Amino acid sequence: MSQALVVLVAGERFGLPVTRAGAVFRVDALTRVPLTAPAIAGLHNLRGKTLAVVHLARLLDPSASAPIDKPLAVTIETETESYAVIVDDVEEVADLPAEARLEGLAHGDPRRVALTAATYRLGQDVLPILDVNRLFEPMADAGERPAPPPAA
């Protein structure tokens, strides 16, 4: 049985695979990076390792407000990279029984559908599990990046 770290983002619950989630920490300082996608909050040094910090609410909804001062973040480790996502809260570690997995839920906001690896019914709630390998894909689209400054 797999498990998910349940996080709260802009009033909604999402799951992050426990096998990919790491440290939970407060982002006390960010270095802004010019010309990055709006969902990139900046870079943060966590125990000597530089991490890109993704504002998860803004990734899911580009009109989301900026994160609060010293936001909560969760580190994510994939096969190719390490980064952190800003969340509003960390609720629990939830068991994801195979029989609770919902199939064929590819409707709704295309941005969210593309970022969802699976969906589970847990009691009365439906929990989307984010595909941590695809969180950077929407930011790679040309439409998401600000235009470079004109040449001098």
Image (cartoon, helix red, strand yellow):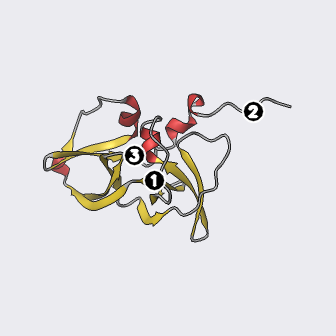
113 horizontally vs 85: left or right: left
Badge 2: residue crowd in 10 Å (few <14, some 14–19, many ≥20): few
Q: Earlier in the sequence, mark 3 or mark 1?
A: 1
Which image quarter holds the N terminus?
Answer: bottom left
- Identify the residue at horizontal 35%, vertical 57% (top origin): 89
Residue under circle 1? 86
Q: Position of residue 52 (x, y in %)?
A: 57, 54
Work out which quarter of the rendered image holds the C terminus and state it: top right
User: Which sits in the foreground, 128 or 31?
Assistant: 31
- Nearest the viewer among 57 and 51 is 57
Rendering coords of residue 18 (x, y %): 35, 60
Task: Bin the neighbour count of mark 3 within 10 Å (Cα to Cα): few under 14, some 14-19, many 20 and up.
Answer: some
SS state under label 3? loop
Q: Earlier in the sequence, mark 3 or mark 2?
A: 3
Q: Is residue 101 left or right of residue 135?
A: left
Q: Secondary structure at mark 2?
A: loop
Q: Amino acid at mark 2?
A: Pro
Q: Residue furthest front?
A: 69
- Nearest the eye: 95 or 148: 148
Element class at badge 1:
strand
**How packed is label 1: few (under 14 Cα within 10 Å), some, or many (20 or more)?**
many
Residue farthest to the left?
Answer: 123
Mark 3 vs mark 1, CA separation in Å: 15 Å
Residue most extreme to the bottom? 47
Residue 1 visible? The answer is: no
Q: Disc 3 to disc 2, how far (Cα)?
A: 33 Å
Identify the residue at image location x=61%, y=34%: 145
Residue type beneath disc 1: Ile
Q: Which numbered circle lies on residue 131?
A: 3
Residue for badge 2 = 149
